Amino acid sequence: MVKTIELTNRQEQIVKIVKEEGPITGEKIAEKLNLTRATLRPDLAILTMSGFLDARPKVGYFYTGKKGNQLISEALKKMSVKDYKAMPVVIKEESSVYDAIVMMFLEDVGTLAVVNNRGTLAGVVSRKDLLKVAMGKQNLQDIPVSVIMTRMPNIITCHIDDPLIEVANILIQNQIDSVPVVRSIENGLEVIGRITKTTITKAFVELGIDKDV
Amino acid sequence: MVKTIELTNRQEQIVKIVKEEGPITGEKIAEKLNLTRATLRPDLAILTMSGFLDARPKVGYFYTGKKGNQLISEALKKMSVKDYKAMPVVIKEESSVYDAIVMMFLEDVGTLAVVNNRGTLAGVVSRKDLLKVAMGKQNLQDIPVSVIMTRMPNIITCHIDDPLIEVANILIQNQIDSVPVVRSIENGLEVIGRITKTTITKAFVELGIDKDV
């Protein structure tokens, strides 16, 4: 069960004091704020339990160096590809560019995984790749998709146990819309799903939905 | 300053007890768990300060009904379109489909906003729209983009102060890749930005980056 807390002004003041002067006893913090030790007790409890501060007997409170949002990011790191991946959409490498475009419209996806006759990943083809060819004067039924695809091993893939946030970062850093989720099998990689910017947008929306405790 | 906390097993037990039997005094909770009141004090402090439980003098603790992740979703609601929107990419409605495809490649975007000669929003055109036309046998230089665009008023737009999460939800619900950010001016809507699945993916990645307190 993960929850966010927003610090009160007083809690922020305490963090500031400990950051600047820690290790410092609870008594000294109370003094600085003109409050009693008892008044501060719940604040100090929440600050230590949430990981902002740590306390050592006979030494006092010190700042853990844990950064703000660190725990929000820890929650994000627990979201994995396994729980969010979409179904793979694959096409055989001998299919034509025309067939690829038709499949892309039928399945309403932006990227197709291309597989060879062993059923393993051979390449990927994007809406952009197809648009580029479609602008030419060639007959789209005569061009095999394998001619225009991005080819192995120049394909970025991900695995079922990868954190979703890492794959999101890969999409941004490489300016791509989609990454196939793969599993190693004999002679290659089997395509078992895909993570796209749509997947990430859905996960983002889901984060904002209040869930039952 | 927003931070997440993860409840300990003991804290989850307390929430469960209060949920089922609240209002209940701290003493009774301690009894049920075979612990002293003093041992429970920090747990009860964190549970009330994080909003899971509330306490009323002489009555005891009760469950607030605040749902898990409620505060994480409150943090998300503070992210607004203003802080994340990308630059608008616009094309004039008399431009050809060919020009639109070229602009899409040059700017590396998936959707263009189409404006009329008053400079206000007339339509939007997506990579998918362009791919559909490009498959035909027509000369792409002869077709104005206004013929194939989705036309006002059938366009979903958003405003600078909208929460990013709402726009993300609009993208998912309407199965679109992009929404123009607009401002009302005389005679129409001025395009001042765009929110795309890329924007949302970037925001998601940013959530996972540890920020300084």
Image (spheres, coloured by chain):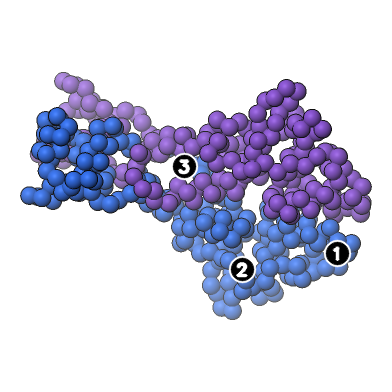
Chain colours: A blue, B purple
Task: Kindly indicate whether the residues beneath marks 1 and 2 are on one polypeptide chain.
Answer: yes
* CB within 8 Å, label 3 to label 1: no
State which chain disc 2 sits on: A
State which chain disc 3 sits on: A
Foreground of the two, B55 or B25: B55
Tell me the SS state at disc 2: loop
Q: Which amino acid does label 2 sit on?
A: Ile
Q: Name the residue under label 3.
A: A207
Density class for disc 1 (Cα within 10 Å; few <14, some 14-19, many ≥20) is: few
Q: Residue furthest front?
A: A20
Q: Mark 1 points at which residue?
A: A141
* Rendering quarter of residue B27: top left
Q: Which of marks 1 and 2 is nearer the N terminus?
A: 1
Foreground of the two, B116 or A189: B116
User: Residue B169: image x %, image y %?
Assistant: 57, 38
Q: Mark 2 points at which residue?
A: A155
The structure residue drawn at horizontal position 55% and vertical position 30%, both measured from the top left corner, is: B161
Q: Earlier in the sequence, mark 2 or mark 3?
A: 2
Q: How many angstroms separate mark 2 from mark 3 (CA)?
A: 29 Å
Q: What residue type is labelled 1?
A: Gln
Horizontal side of residue A168 vs A58, given as left or right? right
Horizontal side of residue A117 vs B148, given as left or right? left
